[in-house]
Image: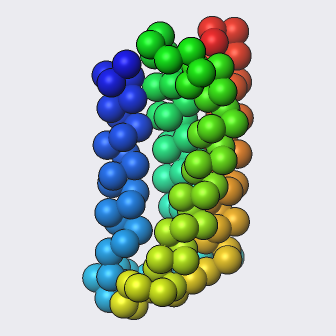
Amino acid sequence: MFRFILPGLLWLITVVGLSLTPGNELQRTDWFVFEFDKVVHTGIYALLVHLWLTGFKRQRVNRFLRDKAFILVISLAIALGVAIEFLQGAFISGRVFDIYDIIANAVGVCVGTCGFYFLYRNYY
């Protein structure tokens, strides 16, 4: 089971580590109409959800995780995005709470879920 969840776990550690990095160490870039930051948030959470769904669906040890993978991964990923934003606003210097980051995270969760579903709908 662990070998299927390992990529998602490593990506989760990376996401949390980067999200809790002080803001004065990051560069801010605007990209056309959108801030590039929002595109990055969407991609990061899409990959996170995709990796966790793949891990939960491929493992054969815990049937509950396999059967409830979508609801667990979606709800936990959204909760993670909200929690990180609150932590950034309250405790991380140079970082602020941004509702648009939460929205970008949620869009990434939807993109990752839909991508997983369309890629593997006949397999899992």
Which residue sits at x=31%, y=22%? Answer: 3
Q: Residue at x 55, y 77 (%)?
A: 86
Instruction: State the residue in front, 54 or 82.
Output: 82
Q: Is residue 105 above or below residue 51?
A: below
Query: Percent x, y for residue 67?
Result: 65, 20
Residue name at image x 33 percent, y 52 percent: 13
User: From the viewer's perspective, is residue 118 above or below residue 71?
Assistant: above
Q: In the rendered view of the protein, which quadrant contains the N terminus?
A: top left
**As drawn, 21 above or below 65:** below
Q: Is residue 92 left or right of residue 54?
A: left
- The foreground one among 89 and 39 is 89
Most foreground residue, 1 or 107: 1
Judge whether residue 80 can be spotted in this image. Answer: yes
The picture quadrant where one finds residue 19 is: bottom left
Number of marks in the image? 0
- Quarter of the image with the C terminus is top right
Q: Residue 64's spot in the image, x, y percent? A: 59, 21
The quadrant where residue 102 appears: bottom right
Residue 53 image position (x, y, % from top left):
55, 30
Answer yes or no: is residue 119 visible.
no
Colour setting: rainbow
Is 13 placed left or right of 102 in the picture?
left
Please state the horizontal and vertical placement of residue 84, each as a whole percent of the image: 50, 69
Along the viewing direction, whichever of 35 and 26 lies nearer the viewer = 26
Please name the residue shown 50% across and 17% down the image: 62
